[in-house]
Image (cartoon, helix red, strand yellow):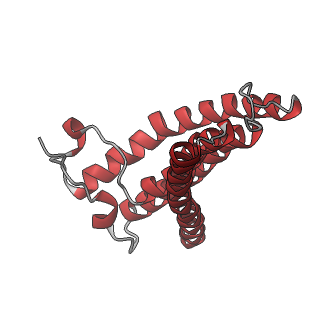
Amino acid sequence: MSILLRLARGIDDVSRRCAQIAAWLVLLSCLISAGNAGSRYLFNASSNAWLEIQWQMFAGILLLGSAHVLKLNEHVRVDLFYGGRTDRQKLLIDVFGFLVFFFPAVIFTLYLAWPFFLESFHSREASSNAGGLILWPVKLLLPLGFFLLALQGIAELVKRLAALGGSSEPIGEMAAYEKPLQ
C-alpha cells in the first residue's frame, strides 16, 4: 500500500502543478480581456482572436484545475447523503461514489473526448470567424483534463482505501466537509 500512496502523492503533485498553470491562465485571461476592451474603446481596434483566446483560456482554467479541486476535497457533494455522517462513513460513501459514479462518467467522457480531439486535429480545424484561432489545442484540453481528473480520482480512491484499512493517512482531511450555507 505504501507504493500506491507514493503514487497518489505524485499524482497530487501533478494536479497541483496543473492548477498553478490554471491560476496563471486566470491572470492572463484578465489581462487579455482588459487589453482587448481598452484597444476596442480607445483605438476602435479589436480581433476575434482576442475574444476566442479568452474562452479557450477559460476551458484551460476549468479542465486543468478540476483535478486539484477534487484533491482539495472542494467538489460538489449531495449533502443529503454526506453531511451528518462519521468520518469513516464519509470515506465509505466516497469509495462507493468513485467506483459507481465518478470513474464510469470520467471514462465515458474520455472515450468521447479523444475522437473529438483527433478529428479536429487531423482536419486542422479552425474557427469560422475572421481572424479566429485554430481549435484543436483547446479540444485537446478536454481529454487531457479528464485524464488528469481520472488520475486524481485514482489517488483519492487509494488514499481513502488506505485510511479505511488503518493507514496513517489523515482521515479527517479526506472527510472534511463544509456544509453549504442555506
For the C terminus, the image quarter is top left
51 or 9, nearer to the observer: 51
Name the residue at 51% across, 44% down.
41
In the rendered image, residue 159, in percent from the top left (x then y), is placed at: 45, 62
Can residue 153 be seen here? The reply is no
Most extreme residue toward the front is 43
For the N terminus, the image quarter is bottom right
Name the residue at 81% across, 28% down.
119
Q: Quadrant of residue 146?
A: top right
Query: How many marks overall?
Result: 0
Name the residue at 20% across, 36% down.
80
Q: Is residue 4 above or below residue 45?
A: below
Q: Is residue 169 above or below residue 42?
A: below
Most extreme residue toward the top is 128
132 or 164, nearer to the observer: 132
On the rendered structure, is 56 left or right of 75?
right
Name the residue at 58% across, 62% down.
21
In the rendered image, residue 64, in percent from the top left (x then y), is placed at: 57, 52
In the rendered image, residue 67, in percent from the top left (x then y), is placed at: 51, 53
Q: Quadrant of residue 15?
A: bottom right
Can residue 178 be seen here? The reply is yes
Q: Is residue 65 above or below residue 9?
A: above
44 or 103, nearer to the observer: 44
In the rendered image, residue 108, in percent from the top left (x then y), is placed at: 61, 30
35 or 83, nearer to the observer: 35
Q: Is residue 161 above or below residue 52?
A: below
On the rendered structure, is 154 left or right of 87?
right
